[in-house]
């Protein structure tokens, strides 16, 4: 089987004409650049060889990485990389002006200007059609209430607005830079190319993690180093990310989850429930897989980022879940939205309202749809309820090792299903789909077909079982596996990479899908 795989690679390269090569290197809307693609793998090898030769030359290295990052973004969103340059230039200039502006009200005005520019772009590209549809519906409703055809009914026609990949991530990152300057928590960058490097750094560009300037900037000017242990750790993260995304997530999505959510009524309740569990695993493996690869690639380049996912389904409370899920985004919402609203400094009732508003806007950040608003509201209510319970009952303040095993098991089970209930709104294409999925689970369950599911979807079931087993694996076990990879000789590490690529290629026939968070 390995010989057939090698032979297919030789055939592919022998058939690769100049026109095809140019086509691979230019933007293709239906196939954006992915960390899990073979093209990125080969480009990164060439990029890394030159990068290694520039380790001693800070400015040359910054320019080189910035140019590659802009090309990477061009391969993801075409000529919209100009929008990235505009964002970086705008906030770079605002930051420089703020540095020389001691008057407080003028500094607040500059922060407001930055927010207007960044949120204005988000508003147009992500929410224009949503707001336009709401306005049309409101006008038609007014006309109906006025009666007698006082207002002619307006027909809503969705405008074709392209959403640049990663817009939400690099705008949030740029906003945090300006607010941190205002709060005195970070230094101002004096070279435009340095700020463009920070905003466009390709490992974190299109889907996070959202790295704060105060954490990133000091690493920019250090001579990149890569110890054997760091190389092994980076390789381990990349291998884990590839398996999560290209094997588990893509396969169960293409072969089961998408089918059920496209037509819930064709499947029994137990299959719908398993599809919900499947999607919970899919979105975790998809996004944490990307984060693992991003953090691993950054580590190979000499940059260390914090973990972005910490086994979130092991959480015993909804509060703990948001400390473990998409940590860079949840901490961003806490620091720049929740605290700005007043946090917990203005009384208990205001704290509950602030939690609800933060998660409601967090849901809206994910997409301009009622479904995402409901998803955010659900988590906001759950967080407020948990906060209330902790304030009233001392026993519920216990977390982690303070809980008995049985209690933590029960609360983890409940929290997981609250999260899964929210994922139904997150994944369904329409509210009608949400209704159909819930209806099938409640009134058409048929648990007797579970064994048929296992036999009919044996690979899907096996991958789901493997995914959840590894997710609930203790941290000590994960560290043990990482240690094996890290301490292995270079030849064994290379063999691990080849085997992983081979496995990914075998599952590629199941259908490769863009990362879920590319749409956000």
Image (cartoon, rainbow, N blue to C red):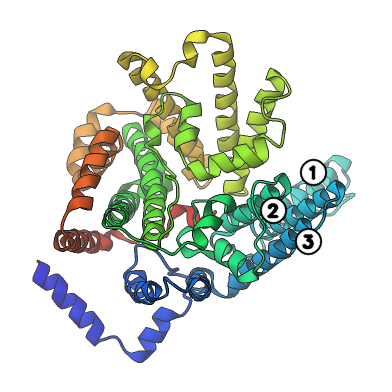
Provide the secondary structure element on which disc 2 rests.
helix
Q: In which image quadrant can residue 410 be found? A: top left
- Give residue 64's position: percent from left, percent from top: 49, 75
Residue tagged 2:
178
**Which badge, 3 or 1, comes first in the chain's sequence?**
3
User: Label 1, on which residue?
Assistant: 141
Q: Label 2 neighbourhood size at 10 Å, few (<14), some (14-19), many (20+)?
A: many
Q: Nearer the viewer, mark 2 or mark 3?
A: 3
Residue 412 position within the rendered picture, expressed as x and y whole percent measured from the top left: 38, 24
Q: In the rendered image of this protein, does residue 105 appear above or below residue 388?
A: below
Q: Quadrant of residue 19?
A: bottom left
In the image, taking residue 235 as reference, residue 276 lies left or right, namely: right
Q: Where is residue 411 shown, x and y percent of the image?
A: 40, 20
Q: Is residue 118 left or right of residue 198?
A: right
Residue 97: image tag:
3
For the residue labelled by badge 3, is the local secondary structure a helix, a strand or a loop?
Answer: helix
Q: Nearer the viewer, residue 323 or 133?
A: 323
Q: Is residue 168 left or right of residue 485?
A: right
């Amino acid at each position: 089987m390995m010989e057939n795989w090698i032979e297919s690679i030789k055939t592919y390269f022998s058939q690769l004409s100049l026109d095809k090569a140019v086509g691979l290197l230019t933007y293709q809307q239906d196939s954006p650049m992915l960390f899990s693609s073979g093209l990125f793998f080969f480009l990164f090898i060439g990029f890394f060889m030159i990068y290694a030769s520039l380790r001693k030359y800070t400015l040359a290295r910054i320019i080189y990485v910035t140019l590659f990052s802009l090309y990477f973004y061009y391969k993801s969103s075409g000529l919209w990389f100009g929008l990235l340059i505009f964002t970086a230039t705008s906030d770079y200039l605002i930051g420089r002006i703020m540095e020389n502006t001691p008057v407080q009200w003028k500094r607040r005005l500059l922060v407001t200007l930055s927010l207007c520019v960044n949120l204005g772009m988000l508003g147009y590209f992500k929410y224009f059609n949503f707001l336009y549809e709401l306005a049309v519906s409101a006008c038609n409703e007014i006309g109906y209430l006025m009666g007698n055809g006082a207002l002619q009914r307006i027909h809503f026609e969705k405008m074709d607005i392209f959403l640049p990949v990663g817009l939400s991530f690099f705008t949030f990152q740029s906003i945090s830079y300006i607010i941190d300057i205002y709060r005195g928590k970070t230094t101002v960058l004096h070279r435009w190319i340095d700020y463009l490097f920070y905003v466009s750094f390709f490992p974190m560009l299109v889907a996070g993690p959202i790295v704060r300037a105060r954490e990133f900037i000091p690493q920019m000017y250090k001579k990149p180093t890569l110890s054997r242990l760091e190389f092994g750790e980076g390789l381990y993260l990349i291998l884990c990310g590839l398996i999560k995304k290209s094997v588990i997530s893509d396969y169960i999505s293409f072969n089961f989850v998408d089918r059920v959510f496209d037509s819930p009524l064709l499947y029994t309740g137990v299959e719908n429930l398993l599809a919900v569990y499947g999607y919970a695993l899919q979105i975790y493996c998809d996004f944490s897989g990307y984060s693992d690869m991003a953090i691993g690639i950054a580590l190979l380049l000499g940059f260390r980022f914090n973990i972005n996912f910490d086994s979130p389904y092991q959480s015993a409370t909804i509060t703990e879940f948001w400390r473990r899920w998409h940590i860079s985004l949840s901490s961003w919402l806490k620091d720049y939205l929740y605290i700005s609203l007043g946090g917990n400094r203005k009384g208990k009732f205001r704290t509950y309202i602030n939690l609800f508003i933060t998660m409601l806007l967090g849901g809206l950040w994910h997409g301009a749809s009622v479904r995402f608003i409901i998803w955010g509201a659900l988590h906001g209510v759950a967080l407020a309820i948990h906060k209330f319970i902790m304030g009233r009952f001392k026993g519920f303040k216990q977390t982690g090792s303070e809980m008995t095993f049985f209690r933590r098991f029960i609360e983890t089970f409940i929290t997981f299903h609250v999260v899964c209930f929210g994922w139904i709104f997150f994944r369904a294409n329409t509210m009608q789909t949400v209704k159909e999925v819930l209806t099938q689970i409640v009134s058409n369950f048929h648990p007797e077909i579970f064994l048929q599911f296992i036999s009919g979807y044996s690979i899907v079931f096996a991958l789901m079982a493997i995914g959840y087993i590894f997710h609930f694996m203790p941290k000590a076990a994960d560290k043990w596996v990482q240690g094996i990879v890290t301490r292995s000789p270079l030849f064994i590490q290379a063999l691990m990479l080849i085997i992983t690529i081979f496995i990914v290629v075998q599952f590629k026939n199941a259908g490769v899908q863009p990362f879920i968070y590319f749409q956000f």
